[in-house]
Amino acid sequence: MTFTMLMARNVRKCFKFITAPQTIRQMSSKLAEEDLKVTDDCVKRLEAICDKDEFLRLCVESGGCSGYQYKFELDRTIANDDCVLETQGIKIVVDTTSLNYIRGSTIDYEQQLIRAAFRLIRNPKAEDGCSCGASFSIKID
């Protein structure tokens, strides 16, 4: 079988998968406050910058000095695999994969002379991190 024939067959399989009718149901779940904690500084900052439909999305990506890095952004869309923490009038959303790397952590907002940013502190799943706190390596049990 030639490369072109293999590619054509794989494209047809993918196309069938993409176009097959699917039932999508809401799968997002609520987080308990022990899953993710939020400091008062974080709450105050989110109250100041978020519109009524916006929330803080936190995810873990590969990269950074230590292997993984935290990414914070304002968002308006909740996906099926997201977990939602609603506390003190603010909303924080984390996808289920990222939650496995940060469960038990605390989200803080820190203002320093050179920068101001959301950051994750006291991550029980992190072993090492860079000095700025933006990246970490996973603790292997």
Image (cartoon, rainbow, N blue to C red):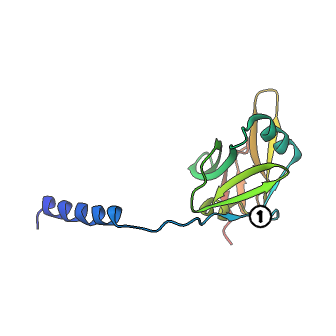
Q: Is residue 35 above or below residue 118?
A: below
Q: In the orientation shown, which residue stands out farthest toward the right?
A: 40
Which residue is nearer to you in this view: 12 or 136?
12
Q: Quadrant of the N terminus?
A: bottom left
Nearest to the observer: residue 132 or residue 72: 72
Q: Quadrant of residue 31?
A: bottom right
Please, is residue 1 above or below residue 79 in the view?
A: below
Query: Residue 29 placed where, x, y %?
Result: 67, 65
Location of residue 106 with respect to 81 vertically, above or below: above
Instruction: Tell me where residue 56 appears, x and y as whole percent.
Output: 70, 46
In the rendered image, which quarter is residue 18 located in?
A: bottom left
The image position of residue 112, as x and y in percent, is 82, 31
Q: Is residue 107 above or below residue 95?
A: above
Disc 1 on helix, strand or loop?
loop
- Name, please, the residue furthest toward the top: 113
Q: Is residue 106 visible?
A: yes
At 57% from the left and 61% from the top, the residue drawn is: 80
Q: Residue at x 75, y 42 (%)?
A: 118
**Position of residue 1 in the picture relative to residue 57 (left or right):** left
| Residue 67 appears in the rendering | no
Residue under the image location 57 percent in, 57 percent down: 79
Q: Which residue is mark 1?
A: 35
Percent x, y for residue 110? 81, 38
Which quadrant: the C terminus? Answer: bottom right
In the image shown, does 10 or 90 lie closer to the viewer?
90
Q: Residue furthest bottom?
A: 141
What amino acid does circle 1 point to?
Asp
Instruction: Answer left or right for 79 relative to 89.
Output: left
Image quadrant of residue 99? bottom right
Crowding near the residue tagged with mark 1, few <14, some 14–19, many ≥20 C-alpha atoms within 10 Å: some
